[in-house]
């Protein structure tokens, strides 16, 4: 790819949560490979705190600016108002040429809006995801739509995401299929000789039997849906003596209370405090299957060829369901129990899911994103080849 000479540009990368950090840090690392092109400024809102710091430490990235917004019992209104106010001051002082935001958090919405207020080019990584239900996931579905409206460059992870954007009236010339940076991060983080920081995991992965890793935290599942999910999981553990369930329990008081009520007291259900990103990725790679209501795990599980039972009614990542890497089970106890039992007992069914082609990436998304930015600013003369799924 040929290069041309032009003035150095300031790229501001804004994020605030651990999921954003894990998906943005590979992009930051790639940007910093080209200091002659880019002055890279990392700004974190601190929408999450401890887990965000763990991710930054893992990727050896120090924020240039930290707004430290997190407080106890924070509301969406508080995060939104505080992030917009804080980011407005930062952007006014720094005047970047491009602002990069990721996904569907309050930080992403606020970063996009502030960039728009200042008429600064917005690049949205993970653009175009849609569940087509504004309350599921909530508030993420509406957040990502708002971000895409104000974006100038849309880095769509898949062709489905691109089609969603075109249907909504976005110009095809501004959309690039890059794959998911979550795949890049997972590949960089997984290691066969990994030693877990959570020592109980070092013992669990060496024991005979099969590990089911689970997560559950979505607000729309609070209450009866979460109780049904947890009851299904306890039944699975009761009926399969070779199965250990590992659940790093989210810090939400609602989630923790429900988990303790339904899942505690079982000798093969291990309720852990939240674990850091490297522990989680390496636990996924050593699991037999995964149960979750997460968004990001739908992208990470196919990297390691682990079937995922998705405990949600909708998904903004239908590619995984179409590829047969994810089973959309809903939140009914009977369905979650039946699908998981089948994966544990029917190896043809299990192998069909575990051998699914990863629809989300090939580990080169961050490289594509940076080369697209380089082309936008005239540092290179050609766009990179876009991501396609290869069977």
Image (tube, rainbow, N blue to C red):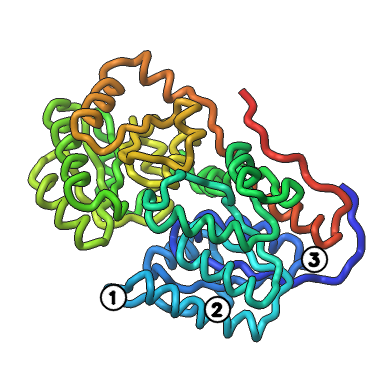
Earlier residue among tags 2 and 1 = 1
Looking at the picture, does residue 307 appear above or below residue 180?
A: above
Q: Secondary structure at mark 3?
A: loop
Judge the density around disc 3: few (<14), some (14-19), many (≥20) Cα neighbours within 10 Å: many
Judge the density around disc 1: few (<14), some (14-19), many (≥20) Cα neighbours within 10 Å: few
Looking at the picture, does residue 235 appear above or below residue 350?
A: below
Please name the residue that numbered disc 2 is placed on. Answer: 87
Earlier residue among tags 3 and 2 = 3
Query: Of the numbered discs in the image, which one, if any, rests on residue 151?
Result: none
Q: Secondary structure at mark 1?
A: loop
Q: Quadrant of the C terminus?
A: top right
Residue 362 visible, this angle = no
| 215 with respect to 169 (left or right) | left
- Point out residue 218 in the picture as x, y percentages from the top left corner: 31, 52
Q: Within the image, what quadrant is residue 313 found in? A: top left
Query: Of the numbered discs in the image, which one, if any, rests on residue 37?
Result: 3
């Amino acid at each position: 790819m040929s290069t041309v000479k032009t003035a150095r540009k300031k790229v501001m990368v804004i994020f605030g949560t651990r999921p954003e950090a894990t998906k943005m840090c590979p992009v930051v690392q790639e940007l910093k490979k080209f200091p002659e092109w880019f002055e890279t400024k990392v700004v974190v809102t601190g929408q999450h705190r401890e887990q965000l710091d763990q991710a930054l430490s893992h990727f050896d990235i120090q924020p240039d600016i930290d707004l430290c917004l997190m407080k106890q019992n924070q509301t969406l209104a508080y995060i939104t108002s505080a992030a917009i106010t804080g980011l407005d001051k930062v952007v006014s002082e720094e005047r970047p040429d491009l602002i990069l935001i990721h996904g569907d958090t309050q930080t992403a919405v606020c970063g996009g809006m502030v960039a728009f207020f200042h008429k600064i080019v917005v690049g949205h990584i993970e653009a175009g995801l849609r569940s087509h239900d504004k309350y599921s996931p909530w508030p993420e579905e509406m957040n990502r739509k708002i971000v895409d409206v104000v974006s100038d460059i849309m880095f769509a992870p898949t062709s489905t995401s691109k089609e969603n954007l075109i249907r909504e009236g976005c110009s095809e010339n501004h959309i690039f299929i890059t794959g998911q940076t979550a795949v890049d991060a997972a590949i960089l983080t997984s290691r066969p000789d990994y030693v877990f920081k959570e020592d109980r995991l070092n013992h669990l992965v060496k024991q005979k039997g099969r590990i089911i890793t689970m997560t559950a935290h979505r607000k729309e599942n609070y209450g009866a849906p979460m109780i049904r999910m947890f009851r299904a999981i306890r039944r699975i553990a009761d009926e399969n003596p070779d199965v250990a369930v590992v659940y790093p329990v989210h810090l939400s008081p609602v989630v923790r209370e429900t988990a303790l009520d339904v899942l505690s007291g079982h000798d093969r259900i291990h309720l852990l405090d939240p674990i850091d990103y490297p522990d989680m990725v390496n636990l996924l790679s050593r699991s037999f299957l995964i149960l979750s209501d997460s968004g990001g795990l739908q992208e990470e599980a196919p990297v390691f060829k682990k079937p995922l039972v998705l405990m949600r009614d909708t998904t903004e990542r239908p590619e995984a369901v179409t590829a047969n890497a994810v089973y959309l089970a809903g939140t009914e106890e009977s369905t979650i129990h039946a699908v998981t039992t089948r994966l544990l007992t029917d190896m043809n069914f299990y192998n069909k899911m575990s051998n699914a082609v990863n629809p989300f990436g090939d580990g080169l998304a961050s490289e594509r994103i940076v080369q697209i930015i380089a082309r936008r600013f005239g540092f290179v003369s050609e766009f990179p080849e876009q991501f396609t799924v290869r069977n």
